[in-house]
Amino acid sequence: MNVEILPNAKELGKAAAVFCSRLLKQVMEEKGSARIVLSTGASQFDTLDALTQTDVDWTRVEMFHLDEYIGLEEKHPASFRKYLKERFVERVPLKKGHFVNGERNVQEHIETLTREIRREPIDLALIGIGENAHIAFNDPPANFDTKDAFIVVDLAERCKKQQVGEGWFASLEEVPKKAISMTVHQIMQSRVIVSCVPYQVKADAIRALFQHETTNQVPATILKTHPEFHLFLDEESASKIDRKLIRE
């Protein structure tokens, strides 16, 4: 695990974008194209904004995203398809984008997504970490055993509160109960994983990440077992960890 701590979310986003752009350029030099996975949520605002301003040749990049609520229309402010199209896809000349769509026949859609994502390895996955230490919508206790690429999950209460807290929904009752999520197994197949985790509300999750060995009760802990895991924090999200235990 490589850890970098930046002064604030804006600087975190810039640093992560520089790292990711260099990696993508290297990958494209080696094989001509690249495949990425992108996260959503408030914590990714600055990273995605900075990434769209890099000189990556996006015409050679294929994108997947992590998850989507079941039954939520794309026009809803909380839709992750809407989020990614507005904050990323419409701002770069992307080769192709694969969106999780919770309005379709769920099983058929999962089968289609699985075929597409498994055609070639994912070169870079930007994986956010939730307030309950979830990755994608794999809330604790996360399923570490399935080898599926995408599954239907029930959203935990803490996860729903995060969505309300970030302003995507007006109340807990409005948050959908289920979502389609990329699995922990599929995330871990990525060649490089980058987690951008700013803000004070993530401090407890980051502390848990450092304090615990691999456990599905703290899903993000599994990222520490990945050979190319890069964690970008800001001073707020890193405020509850012992700096002596990490190398910045």
Image: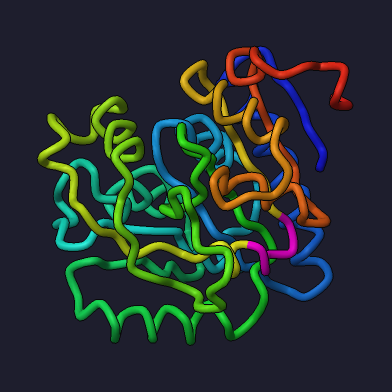
Q: Quadrant of the N terminus?
A: top right
- The residue depicted at 15 percent of the width and 51 percent of the height is 75
- The residue depicted at 16 percent of the width and 35 percent of the height is 172
- The residue depicted at 73 percent of the width and 57 percent of the height is 192
In depth, the one of 200 and 48 nearer the eye is 200
242 is higher (above) or lower (below) than 119? above
Magenta span: predominant SS is loop
In depth, the one of 144 and 135 nearer the eye is 144
Residue 29, quarter of the rendered image: bottom right
Span highlighted in magenta in the image:
188-192
| Image x and y of residue 67, in percent | 38, 58
Q: Quadrant of the C terminus?
A: top right
Residue 147, quarter of the rendered image: bottom right
Query: In this rendering, would 144 be left or right of 81?
Result: right
| Image x and y of residue 99, in percent | 36, 66
- The residue depicted at 19 percent of the width and 75 percent of the height is 104
- Magenta segment: does it hold 107? no
